[in-house]
Amino acid sequence: MNALPQIDGETLLYPIAGHPIGQVKSPTHLSALMARDAINALVIPAHVLPGDLGPWLESLERWQNVPGVVLTVPHKAAGLAFCSRVSKRARAASAVNILVRDPRGGWTGDATDGAGHLDGIAAHGFDVAGRRALLVGTGGAGAAIAYEILARGAATLALHDIDAARRDALITRLAPEFPGRLQVGSADPTGFDLVANATPLGMREGDPLPVQTDRLTPAQFVSDVVTKPAVPALIAAARAKGCATMAGTEMFEAQAQLLADILTGRRGIEA
């Protein structure tokens, strides 16, 4: 999947904005997916500081060859405020990671991190339905993953975040749709079938581990959103304990086609 489209006056541009941006794998991979499907488009990195997100998105509305945008850390929660319409899962997660131009004006937002994460886990043969799950991190990606874990039938979901107010706000948003299935968690993974990390911990050398890995057991499935390094410290520790795992790179692979389909209009956003 190395072929890229010829760049000409009809090439569509899809920026992916983040801070930092050097870790993202989307530009090459999504551009290649579009080229494979004979779509004349490029996904390009955009290093956008948090305070500049609003003006940047507003300027893109004037670029008629930018039909959509991908948002990554730390813009997912903030991006919601710049959408005219959002999907049900984005509203529940209070975050967006993809925006597409709405013909009525403005942007329509969606949150695909949860679908990508759970699809990646399912590809390893793990079904969250009826299971007990622990999720660490309730930011933009974590909120989307939390919604998807519950939507796919987890018996209970425990949430842990060093920001207790953010954790509690997510519980408040999700509880009406999933009554009795949410609880406050901790860094202790004991008793859970799925242990998922949705924090950036592991991206930098020397980061603390998001959970107490000495308490993991081989029967548990451990997943991570971190894409760089390819084998984050949590995943390495979980494998050493005999756990089945899914790293962030596998999550990205699972949601790449979904992102490409939404960006290019082959799949709509149910707002």
Image (spheres, rainbow, N blue to C red):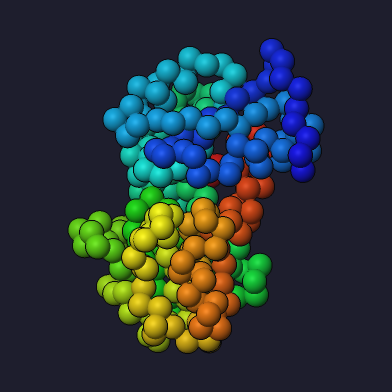
Residue at the image point whose x is 52% and y is 50% from the top:
112
Locate residue 57, reporting x and y percent. 42, 25
Residue that lies at the very extreme toward the front in this rendered image: 206
Locate residue 234, reporting x and y percent. 45, 69
Residue at the image point whose x is 53% and y is 32% from the top:
45
**In terms of image quadrants, where is residue 72?**
top left
Name the side, left or right, on which 49 lies relative to 265: left
User: Looking at the rendering, in which quadrant would you find the N terminus?
Assistant: top right
Image height of 195 relative to 175, above or below: below
Residue that lies at the very extreme toward the left in this rendered image: 165
Image height of 81 relative to 183, above or below: above
The reply to whether residue 217 is visible in this rendering is yes
For the image, the number of numbered tags is 0
**In terms of image quadrants, where is residue 127?**
bottom right
Image height of 255 relative to 36, above or below: below
The reply to whether residue 182 is visible in this rendering is no
Residue at the image point whose x is 37% and y is 61% from the top:
206
Given residues 188 and 261, the one toward you in this image is 188
Given residues 146 and 173, the one toward you in this image is 146
Residue at the image point whose x is 59% and y is 19% from the top:
65
